[in-house]
Image (cartoon, rainbow, N blue to C red):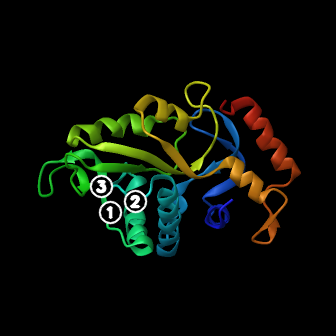
Amino acid sequence: MEQYKQEFIEFMVESEVLKFGEFTLKSGRKSPFFMNAGAYVTGTQLRRLGEYYAKAIHDNYGLDFDVLFGPAYKGIPLSVATTMAISELYGKDIRYCSNRKEAKDHGDTGILLGSKLKDGDRVVIIEDVTTSGKSIEETFPIIKAQANVEVKGLMVSLNRMERGKGDKSALEEVKELYGFPTAAIVSMADVVEHLYNRECQGKVVIDDVLKAAIDAYYVQYGAK
C-alpha cells in the first residue's frame, strides 16, 4: 500500500473522522464503523486532506482534466482544498465548481459556485463517501444540464465496500449506471489491513473483537 494511503488512514482516525464502535446508519444498518467528513474543521486538516485527494486523483485519473466538481455541501470545501493542492503539488491549475442547493437569482446568479462549466470541459467529481449513490443521482443531471462536458470519474475518500441498492457496492453501481470510472483514496479493506493489531496514537484501533465485528458486518452487507 502506498505511503500516502497509510498516512491517510491514520489521519482519518486522528481527525476523528473515522470512528469505530456501534453506529446506526441512515439505511438502518448497524455498523461497527462510521465516517463523517464534516469533522475536518481546521486549516491544517483541510490542507492535508486536499493533498491526499490530489495524490489519489493523480494516481487514478492523471491531471488531464479541467474542472473539479464538488456536490453541495461537503463537496464544496473538498473541491477548493484539492484544486489548491493540485496546484501546489503538480503545478497544474484546475478550476473548481460546486452546485447550490437552490439557484441564486441576483448577483452571481445560477445554480453553480466557482467556475462555470463550458462545452468540452473534462470533469472529475469529488465527494467524501458514497453509500447509496443518491448525491450523484442528484448532481449528475445538474452537471450535464450546464454544458456538454465529459465526466472523467468520481473520487471519494473511503470505499465502504458494502452493498448499495443491489448486490454491488455503491461505487460499482455509479460506474455501471453513469458510465464513468469511480475510485477511492482507500477502501475499508485497506483500513483493516493497516490498523489491525497495530497502534495508532498509542493504542490498537482494530483489535480481534472489532475485527470480528467488521468481518460479520461484511458477511451481512458486503458487496459482491
Mark 3 secondary-structure assignment = strand
Locate residue 3: give its quadrant.
bottom right
Please rate how many residues cluster around mark 3, counting C-alpha atoms within 10 Å: few if below 14, some from 14 to 19, many from 20: many
Q: Residue at x 75, y 71 (%)?
A: 201
Give the image location of residue 162, x and y in percent: 64, 36
Q: Nearer the viewer, mark 1 or mark 2?
A: 2
Look at 55% across and 26% down and name the residue there: 165
**Which residue in the protein does label 2 denote?**
63
Separation of marks 2 and 3 at Cα, in angstroms: 16 Å
Are the two marked residues, 2 and 3, in contact with CB atoms closer than 8 angstroms? no
| Circle nearer the viewer, 1 or 3 | 1
Query: Looking at the picture, how far across and down is residue 117, in whole percent?
Result: 22, 50
Residue at figure coordinates x 67%, y 30% from the top left: 224
Q: Is residue 194 left or right of residue 115?
A: right
Horizontal relation, residue 82 to residue 122: left or right:
right
Q: Nearer the viewer, mark 2 or mark 3?
A: 2
Within 10 Å of the Cα at label 2, are there few (<14), some (14-19), or many (20+) other Cα atoms?
A: some
Looking at numbered disc 3 in the image, what kind of residue is underneath it?
Cys
CB under 8 Å between callouts 1 and 2?
A: yes
Q: Amino acid at mark 2?
A: Leu
Q: Which residue is mark 3?
A: 97
Residue 97, how many percent across, how many down? 30, 55
Indicate the amino acid at tag 1: Ile
Q: Residue 63, percent across and down?
A: 40, 59
Q: Please, is residue 165 above or below residue 89 in the view?
A: above
Q: In this rendering, is residue 221 above or below 48?
A: above
Which mark is drawn over residue 94?
A: 1
